Amino acid sequence: MKYVNDTVRRRDRLLDEQRACELLATSEYGVLSMTDEEGRPYGIPVNFVWNGEDAVYIHCAPEGKKLRAIERHPAVSFCIVGRVNLLPDRFTTEYESVVFTGSARANLAPEERMHALELLVDKLSPDFKELGRKYSEKSFHRVQIIRIDFTEYSGKRKKVLWGMRDE
């Protein structure tokens, strides 16, 4: 996975790679954007977990629109929004965001699917790990896992300096 900020027009708003990875590790959800089976744009917010390297896992039902879309068009985009601070008196917003591109795939090996569920439980329900593992085993047949392998990502942020007008 390569951090590429070459296309960010506002060079003063680049988000550093370390913070981009922090957002990837700690954010609760992201927006998965893809092309649906009819060729139309389709985006949906999803929980996810980063594998610590170059992919994230998403859980879903064993059939549905997401799965049909990625089967036909595996190229996807994934966006995470970090801190947001609306500044009404300044007519602007402070923010940070990261956009990833890559390809999605389902029908992973059972071992990888269970590993992904364990990672999701560890991240999203850390106080209930044992119960989460039991639940994962019990509902395994009703859950599909999508892995998104990232090829590149970029980050952007806006921080308003008080006392100065942001142009």
Image (tube, rainbow, N blue to C red):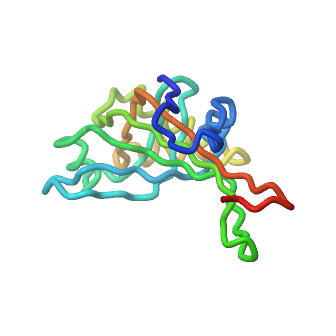
Residue lying at 25% horizontally and 38% vertically, measured from the top left: 74
Q: Confirm whether residue 131 shows in the render.
A: no
Q: Closer to the camera, 155 or 101?
A: 155
Asked whether residue 158 is in view, the answer is yes
Point out the residue furthest to the left here. Answer: 38
Image coordinates for residue 68, horizontal then vertical, percent? 20, 49
Q: Residue at the location (67% across, 72% down)? A: 91
Q: How many marks?
A: 0
* Residue in the foreground of this view, choosing between 86 and 31: 86
Q: Residue furthest right?
A: 163
In the rendered structure, the answer to whether residue 126 lies left or right of residue 119 reads right
Residue 37 position, x and y percent, is 16, 53
Point out the residue furthest to the bottom here. Answer: 89
Residue 41: quadrant of the picture: bottom left
| Picture quadrant where residue 93 is located | bottom right
Q: Nearer the viewer, residue 61 or 53?
A: 53
Residue 7: percent from left, percent from top: 46, 36
Quarter holding the C terminus is bottom right
Residue that appears at 57% across and 44% down: 10
Does residue 144 sit above or below 103 in this rendering?
below
Residue at the image position 26 percent from the left and 48 percent from the top: 67
Closer to the camera in the image, 21 or 112: 21
Q: Is residue 35 left or right of residue 29?
A: left
Measured as percent of width and height from the top left, residue 9 is found at 51, 43
Above or below, comparing residue 151 to residue 74 in the picture: above
